[in-house]
Structure formats: C-alpha cells, structure tokens
Image (spheres, rainbow, N blue to C red):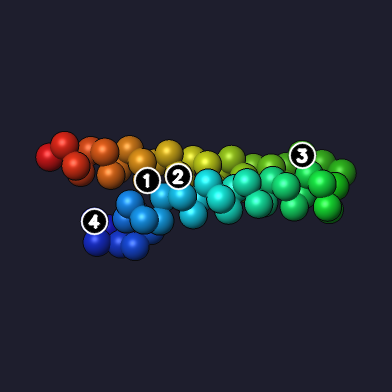
Amino acid sequence: MHNSILWSKGFIPVYFVAALLHFILFKIYIQPEGDAIYLQTLMLIGLGIASLLHNYNRQEN
C-alpha cells in the first residue's frame, strides 16, 4: 500500500481534476434527474483528501 501509485504525490491532482471533470460533465452536459450521481464526485474528492493526509503523515515519519 505504501508503494502504490494511487497514493503517490504526483497522483493527488488526478483525483481533484477527475472530480471536477465528473461534476462538469454531469452538471452541464448530461443533467441527470437525481442527485445520487454526485456521490461519485464526493468519493473522488474524499480519495484526494485521504491521499493528501497519507502523504503528509508519511512525510512526518
């Protein structure tokens, strides 16, 4: 888990860019009826925050 590319510092912006593109795609282009699709956007933002915290804690130790 420590050597995974998903937790590397270079991959952190990917989560936030993917969340932004996902939000824009569904909000402007597709316009879904329900709001449940935005849970995927929140999960991507959560992964980005978790990756930031993981790298911050690894850097301190």
Categorize mark 2 by other alpha carbons within 10 Å: few (<14), some (14-19), many (20+).
Answer: many
Cα distance between the residues tagged 1 and 3: 26 Å
Q: Nearer the viewer, mark 1 or mark 3?
A: 1
- Quarter of the image for residue 38 reads top right
Secondary structure under badge 2?
helix
Cα distance between the residues tagged 3 and 4: 34 Å
Residue 33: image x %, image y %? 87, 44
Can residue 32 be seen here?
no
**Mark toward the start of the polypeptide (2 vs 3):** 3
- Quarter of the image for residue 50 reads top left
Marks 1 & 2, CB-CB < 8 Å contact: yes
**Mark toward the start of the polypeptide (1 vs 3):** 3
The mark found on residue 2 in the picture is 4
Q: On the image, numbered disc 1 is attached to which residue?
A: 51
- Residue in view at x 72 percent, y 47 percent: 24
**Mark toward the start of the polypeptide (4 vs 1):** 4
Q: Amino acid at mark 1?
A: Ser
Q: Nearer the viewer, mark 2 or mark 4?
A: 2
Cα distance between the residues tagged 2 and 4: 16 Å
Residue 42: image x %, image y %? 59, 40
Secondary structure under badge 3?
loop
Cα distance between the residues tagged 2 and 3: 21 Å
Secondary structure under badge 4?
loop
60 vs 45, left or right, is left
Q: On the image, numbered disc 2 is attached to which residue?
A: 48
- Residue in view at x 37 percent, y 45 percent: 51
Q: Amino acid at mark 2?
A: Gly
- 1 or 11: nearer the viewer: 11
Q: On the image, numbered disc 3 is attached to which residue?
A: 35
